[in-house]
Image (cartoon, rainbow, N blue to C red):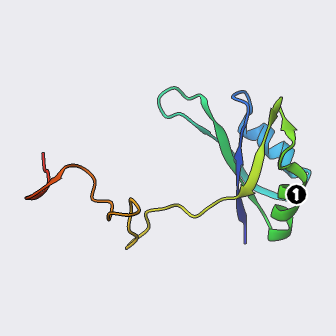
Amino acid sequence: MPVKLFVGGLSYSTSSERLREAFAACGSVESASVVTDRDTGRSRGFGFVEMATSEDAEQAISRLNGTSLDGRTIQVERAKAPAGGPGERRGGPGGGRGGFSGPRGPRRF
């Protein structure tokens, strides 16, 4: 089963293909993508790489975390599961109600 890795600290010039090439030295890469801004199309400075096996992922973390890629020191770690799944409370303490909460409850516009 593929293991998704978070890669932070990327140069704004690093492409998804360049990211794939860098991680291919550590094992089989299922996918590699640099996250871009939806409005400008520019890199946001981080991305995700899916390695084919857990062993490949661990090797990529140990070999690439803290190294330089395109002139920037990158951070490589296992990606965390996205927050906000079904039934999950958001917002931490206070229940995540957000907005104005006066005597009549949340303000609706």
Q: Residues within 10 Å of mark 1 (few under 14, many from 20)?
A: few
**Quarter that holds the N terminus:** bottom right
Q: What amino acid type is highlighted by mark number 1?
A: Ser
Q: Position of residue 19 (x, y in %)?
A: 78, 42
Task: In the rendered view, tell whether residue 50 sits above or below residue 73.
Answer: below
Instruction: Choose between 37 and 73: the one closer to the eye.
Output: 73
Residue lying at 59% horizontally and 28% vertically, measured from the top left: 42
Q: Quadrant of residue 54?
A: bottom right
In the rendered structure, the answer to whether residue 24 lies left or right of residue 51 reads: right
Task: In the rendered view, tell whether residue 24 sits above or below residue 15.
Answer: below
In the rendered structure, the answer to whether residue 53 lies left or right of residue 32 reads: right
Residue lying at 84% horizontally and 45% vertically, measured from the top left: 66
Instruction: Choose between 15 and 88: the one closer to the eye.
Output: 88
Task: In the rendered view, tell whether residue 98 sits above or below residue 70.
Answer: below
Helix, strand or loop at label 1? It is helix
Q: Position of residue 18 (x, y in %)?
A: 80, 37
Residue lying at 92% horizontally and 50% vertically, measured from the top left: 25
Instruction: Choose between 101 and 59: the one closer to the eye.
Output: 101
In the rendered structure, the answer to whether residue 11 lies left or right of residue 103 reads: right
Q: Quadrant of residue 44?
A: top right
Instruction: Choose between 102 and 41: the one closer to the eye.
Output: 102
> Label 1 belongs to which residue?
62
Residue lying at 37% horizontally and 73% vertically, measured from the top left: 87
**Quarter that holds the C terminus:** top left
